[in-house]
Image (cartoon, helix red, strand yellow):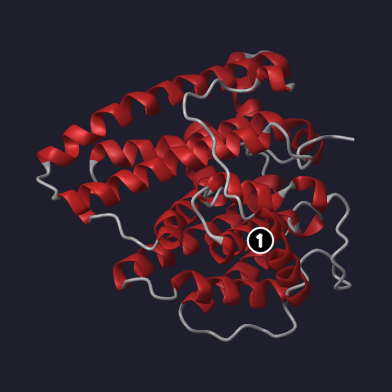
Amino acid sequence: MSDDDSLRNPFPHRRSPYHAEATELHRAWLERHPLLHADGSVGHTGYAHWDVVDLAALGYPDSGPEELALAADLMGFYFLFDDQFDGPLGRRPAEVAAICDRLAAIIHGAKPDPHSPAETAFDDLWRRSTLGMPARWRARAAYNWEWYFASHPAEAAGRISERPPDRDGYLALRRGTAAMETIFDMIERLGRFEVPLAAHHHPLLRQLRQLAADIPSLSNDVRSYPKEAPTGDVNNLVMIVQRERGCSADAACTLVMAEAQLMIARCADLVTQLPEAYRMLSLDQDQQERARRYATGLTDWLAGYLHWEARTGRYRVA
């Protein structure tokens, strides 16, 4: 897929100016939690070309140095944790479940294994992410992290199954493994505010949040298809559309991107409706501002991710 095939996005991307400071902090974090190599080195082939800090800077453009470093550490964890399942381990669901169960237990107070970089890294991320946040936010964040971890055993089972998922099954699993709800929780954490409950669960904002989560998954499926197809990773919408339509991979990619483009148009429409929804909820000025900041955070993430994805070396096939 070329950059010319990228989605047309009406939301402008912005970038935090603290890239250099966050890069140094992120490197130090990787050295403390050596996720990149089993031997503890930080020289993961290609990692520097993924521009993980730039994704954080684009996704959370109003973040200061410390907040941006936390976001970069989260991005690095998502990618590197997910990548460990690309090999033989990712076809052993019971072992994947054991790993994920131990990580989920940290949310509820379990001590990490000091010899497990994944556990010490997540313990650090969970502690820093929840620091100073209200109980309701922590409860939501805990649920979303559990959802993320618990989705990986099902993904591993899918790799060895002779029954590829249908569209509904794909969405149910992809929405877990994509970790987007945890990413969106960080809009509030990094901005140090909480969305009013009535606004957070209003149908319009729920729709915007779901679309902002699904669009990157569709675009990512197209970009990662050349890497995933040879490995038997079946949880990819391009493969599902191929089966549904009986078409070529190229045609399926075009259809998936067209679907994502329609979803972007729906996002733009929803954004115009939100101010009236806030007024109908009788939110005061402060509540409306917090809801507005959250909605802007969703579209900032969407714009930033799409800009980053078109340029990162992560999805290029040698």
Q: Secondary structure at mark 1?
A: helix
Position of 189 compared to 44: left or right?
Answer: left
Image position, residue 198 (x, y; %): 19, 51
Q: Quadrant of the N terminus?
A: top right
What residue is drawn where x is 69% and y is 51%? Answer: 52
What residue is drawn where x is 81% and y is 56%? Answer: 88
Image position, residue 67 (x, y; %): 54, 63
- Look at the image and tell me whether residue 298 can be seen: yes
- Residue at image mark 1: 22
**Toward the viewer: 128 or 159?**
128
**Toward the viewer: 291 or 36?**
291
Position of 25 compared to 278: left or right?
Answer: right
**Toward the viewer: 95 or 86?**
86
- Look at the image and tell me whether residue 165 can be seen: no
What residue is drawn where x is 58% and y is 53%? Answer: 154
| Local crowd size for mark 1, using a 10 Å CA cut-off: few (<14), some (14–19), many (≥20) | many
Question: Against 17, is 267 above or below?
Answer: above
For the residue marked with disc 1, what is the amino acid?
A: Ala
Position of 171 compared to 273: left or right?
Answer: right
What residue is drawn where x is 38% and y is 69%? Answer: 138
Question: Against 48, is 269 above or below?
Answer: above
Q: Residue furthest front?
A: 17
Image position, residue 2 (x, y; %): 74, 21
User: What count of labels does the image hold?
Assistant: 1
Question: Against 75, is 225 above or below?
Answer: above
Image position, residue 261 (x, y; %): 51, 20
Query: Where on the picture, by quarter, is residue 236?
Result: top right
